[in-house]
Amino acid sequence: MTDTPAKPSSPRRSRPVKVADQIKDWVVERDLKQGAKLPNEAEMIALFGVSKGTVREAMRILEAQGLIVTRTGPGGGSFVGEVSLERAKSLLANYFYFQDLSVSDIYQMRKVVEPELAASLAGTLKPDQIAELRGLVQQYDRPAESPEEERDQHIASLRFHAKLAEYSRNPLLAFMVSFMARILTDLTVYRRLYEPHNEELRVRGQRHQLDLVEALEAGDADRAEAIMRSHMLGAESLMQRQEARVMRRFIAE
Amino acid sequence: MTDTPAKPSSPRRSRPVKVADQIKDWVVERDLKQGAKLPNEAEMIALFGVSKGTVREAMRILEAQGLIVTRTGPGGGSFVGEVSLERAKSLLANYFYFQDLSVSDIYQMRKVVEPELAASLAGTLKPDQIAELRGLVQQYDRPAESPEEERDQHIASLRFHAKLAEYSRNPLLAFMVSFMARILTDLTVYRRLYEPHNEELRVRGQRHQLDLVEALEAGDADRAEAIMRSHMLGAESLMQRQEARVMRRFIAE
DNA sequence: TAAGATTTGTTCGTATGTATC
DNA sequence: GGATACATACGAACAAATCTT
C-alpha cells in the first residue's frame, strides 16, 4: 500500500523492517500528525506479536529516517516527528557519497535553480528579511587577511544563499538550494576549497549580492534573476579550477 | 569529524546511535568501498564493548539509511552497500511528506531543470539509447480508451523523463529529475491525477517528445532545450487544475 | 540428499537509567 | 526524596538462513 509499486522478489525482509513498515501503516491509517504519540514498547509488543528487541530495532529504523523521536521517562515514548531539513540533507548527502559528483555538476544545477529562486523571491520579502540578508553580506565586507578568514567569508556567502532558500515558499526549490549550499560548505570546510585569493572576484561577488538584495526589495524579478545568473557564473569560475570530486566520505548524523 | 559542524548540546544520543556513528567512522577511516565486509556481530560486540542488542540496533540504523546490507549464513555478515537511487528518493520523499508541496511547486522546478538536462544530453546519446527513448514514446501512440489506459500512458510519459535522467552524466541533475518523475508518478497512481481526457494535449505532448529525441540525436542542444521548455509548459497546464497537495502519506521502504 | 558449520535473527528475563509527579 | 512510568541495555539461549562437504 504505502510501498513502492512491487518489489520483484524482495531480497528478504527481516522482521524489524516489516514491523517498521507496519508501524508506518499504523500511523498513516490514523493520519497522525507531528507530535502524536505512538504506542509504547509493551503495547507494540502486543500489537505486532514480536519481542521487545524486534520492536526496538524497528523503532531505530524509523528514528534513523527521522520519522519518529523518542523520549524516556514518564510521559515519554515515541512520537511522530517531522523529518527535519537537516536530516533530509544528510540522508541525501549519503547518496551522493557514492556518486561521482563534481563541482561543475553542482554549478550546472545552481546556474538554473538559483536564478529561478531569486526571481520568485522578488517583491515577497519583508523588511526584516531584507535586513538580515544585508547583514550577511556585511560579514565579508573587507578583504580577508588570512586563509581562515577567507574561508569564513566563503561560508558566509553560502549562508546568504541558504537564507534565500529559507525564504522561498517552494519547498522543493528551497531544499535544492539549501542542499547545494551545504555540500559546498562542507567542501570548503573539509577540503580548503577556496581560491588562492582573488580580491577582484570577491569584490564583484559582494557587489552582486548587494545589487540582488536591492532588486529583491524593489520587486524587480527580471533583474534579480539576471544578477543571480551572473553571480553564479562568477562563483563557478571561482571554483572551477577545483577538480575535486565532491563526496568521498560518509556524512554522519 | 564526520559530523555536522558541532551540535550545540545534542538532545541526547542513545548508545545504538553512538555505535552507528563509530561504525561509520570505522568505515571511513579504512576508506572501505562498496561490498567490503564489516566485522560480524561478535566482533562488533568486542570492538565497541556493547551488547548484541545494541550492535543490532546500530546496524538497523545504518541499514535504514542504505549504508549497509546484511546477509545471513556462512560468508554472510554486513557489507558496505551504496545507497541506491530508489532509497535516496524514498528517504527524501519522506521529508516532503511533511512539507506542503504543490504540483505547481514541482513544475516551477521542472521548468528550469528539465530543459537544462535536455540541452546537456544533446549529441551524447548512443543509438540504442535513442532507440529506447523512441520505444517509450510509442507506448502512448494512440488515444487512450479507458481511464486506466490514460493513467498508464501518463506514467509511461514520466518514464521517458526518468530515462533521460538516467542517461545524464550529472548525478545531481539526474537525481532531481528522477525524483520529480517519481513524485508525479506516485501522484498519478494514488490520486488519479490525470486529466478528464484531452486528446489534443496528448498528441502535442507526444509530438514534443518525438521532436526532442530527434534534436538529441542531431546534437542540437538549443533546440532540445526549447522543445523541453515548451513541453514542460504544456504538461504544467495539463496538471495545473489539480490543486492537490502532493505528499500526504508516508513513503515506505 | 543430508549433515554440519557459520552467521544473522529473535526471544525472554532481568537490571539500570531517566524524567515526571 | 520517593514512587511511578517509561525507555535503555545486557546476556544467555534458541531459531532460521545459507554455505560447504
Image (spheres, coloured by chain):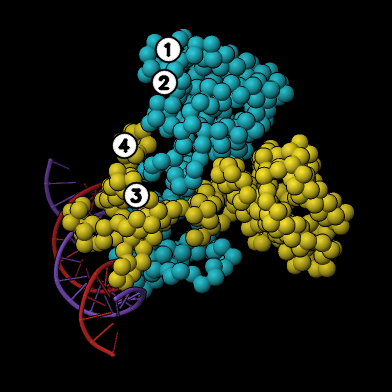
Chain colours: A yellow, B cyan, C purple, D red
Report how far apart the C-alphas of labels 1 and 4 lie in the structure. 26 Å
Circles 2 and 1 in contact, beta carbons < 8 Å: yes
Please state which amino acid type lies under the numbered disc 3: Leu
**Disc 3, disc 4: CB below 8 Å?**
no
Image point (59%, 65%), residue name: B5
Residue A231 vertical position relative to residue B1 in the rendered view, above or below: above
Q: CA distance from mark 3 to mark 4?
A: 17 Å
Q: Residues within 10 Å of mark 1 (few under 14, many from 20)?
A: some
Task: Look at 56% across and 17% down and name the residue there.
Answer: B205
Residues at marks 2 and 1 on the same chain: yes
Which amino acid type corresponds to the residue marked 2 in the rendered image? Asp
Cα–Cα gap, marks 2 and 1: 9 Å
Quadrant showing the C terminus of chain B: top left
Residue at 53% over, 11% down = B200
Q: Which residue is mark 2?
A: B152
Q: Which residue in the protein does label 4 denote?
A: A1
